[in-house]
Amino acid sequence: MNPRSAVFALFTVGIVAVLLAGPMRSVHAQKQPAPLAALPAVPVPPDQPLTADRVKLGELLFFDPRLSGDGSIGCVDCHDPKKGWGDGNALSRGYPGTMHWRNSQTVVNSAYLKNFFWGSGSSTLEAQAHSAATGALAGNIQPRLGEERMKQIAVYVDLFQRVYGEKPSWEKAMLAIAAYERKVTSNDAPFDRFVRGDRTAMTAGQQRGRTLFETKAGCIACHNGALLTDEQHYNIGVPPNPEFVTNPQRQIAMRERIRGKGIPEQVYLKFDRDPGRYLETKKDEDLGKFRTPPLRYLTYTAPYMHNGVFFTLEEVVDFYDRGGDADSFGTKSDLITPLRLSGQEKADLVSFLESLSGTELRHERPTLPPYGVLEFPMTSGTFK
Ligand code: HEC
Ligand code: HEC
């Protein structure tokens, strides 16, 4: 190598080093967890303002079973306000004739998320609503059928006209449901009030629990920011749910979903448990990983975890205290190790988790508008 090209090579190495150092610094910065915080106002797309009509339309559609194939199951049936806006079961019910293989998540505060579902299978509320309504395990409807049903309901025709200036359409129906979900939020937890300045809002035990959460127990590494989630994916060694192990219907449901993601039979027949995030990325390193769930509104959303295997927050804290359970995917996070907490520390941690839930969001079922008989121009002789 002549001296000039040696200098050039050194120069290039220098540039590359500088380029590498930049991103490395920022990766390091990301490791600092976002501090816990009170919930800010919910983000609303500027072109979808939460007007009364838009939210009303979304509310009716959220409760309306006619947005499912056989007209029997609405969003509300698996996201019931009386059950923490989930369905209260360890594993969710499914579309009639199916049984879901995962726990139904709460929709409370889901409008703050950027990744939806346990494995982050959707990235907008609207796309999420479409997957839920059309998926074989949930709403199982063809959008065309949904549109024709809505067009036969005068109140919907009127509301779509007022909100979107057009006839009922599937796409706009999903926008309206998302608008309604942006109203289903809870930000009055004792923790929120404490952070906003009311020093009496949290008990001494809850405050000790918060300190443990942020230090010795290490929870904040993944559960951070105002929602208490980094929205990243981890395998924390949650044990299988015995109901999944013994119920063929649950297994059929899981395989239906896995196949839907284009994963071949010789691969998916191996899974005796939920491969989680792998369904979306098909990377072995994502086997058994799930999105860190938010920790708000927990008081109302038991049972916990993607498969609802824990019924109380005490069980969850015991699980973390023993360093999680065995994992058969080989992807368990190094952040999950035995904590050796005392009885008092465990109780404090549970108290802190309880301080993250505010008043229960009750919501009466609205009266759904009936189908009507349309008037046809040709009946009065004007077909052309
Ligand atoms: C048969 C039960 C069922 C029905 C019906 C249903 N869901 Fe769900 N929902 C679930 C389950 C189970 C999950 C978690 C599924 C997963 O992770 O794969 C979920 C997840 C969600 C989430 C994600 C929350 C989060 O934290 O990421 C939202 C939002 C949601 N559903 C809204 C809806 C809407 C809107 C409808 C109606 C269009 C609906 N669901 C219909 C069972 C149901
Ligand atoms: C390595 C990241 C990580 C750490 C550290 C962590 N968690 Fe989690 N947490 C998760 C993930 C991922 C899930 C969902 C796992 C699943 O369903 O398989 C979860 C689930 C939960 C749930 C259930 C929530 C629900 O809606 O079902 C609670 C409660 C919880 N964690 C509390 C804690 C506490 C308390 C600590 C500290 C002792 C902690 N977590 C530490 C990642 C983490």
Image (cartoon, rainbow, N blue to C red):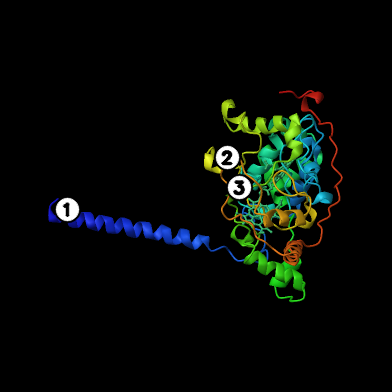
- Kindly indicate whether the residue at mark 1 contacts the one at mark 2 (C-beta within 8 angstroms): no
The three-letter code of the residue at mark 1 reads Ser
Asked whether the viewer can see residue 36, the reply is no
Q: Residue furthest left?
A: 2
| 309 is higher (above) or lower (below) than 27 | above
Mark 2 CB within 8 Å of ligand 2: no
Q: Quadrant of residue 272?
A: top right
The tag on residue 278 is 2
Left or right for 191, reference 289:
right
Q: Quadrant of residue 75?
A: top right
Q: Categorize mark 3 by other alpha carbons within 10 Å: few (<14), some (14-19), many (20+).
A: many
The tag on residue 5 is 1
Mark 1 CB within 8 Å of ligand 2: no
In front of the other: 61 or 269? 269
- Which residue in the structure is indicated by mark 3? 235
- Helix, strand or loop at disc 1? helix
Which dot, 2 or 3, sits closer to the camera? 3
Q: Categorize mark 1 by other alpha carbons within 10 Å: few (<14), some (14-19), many (20+).
A: few
Mark nearer the N terminus (2 vs 3): 3
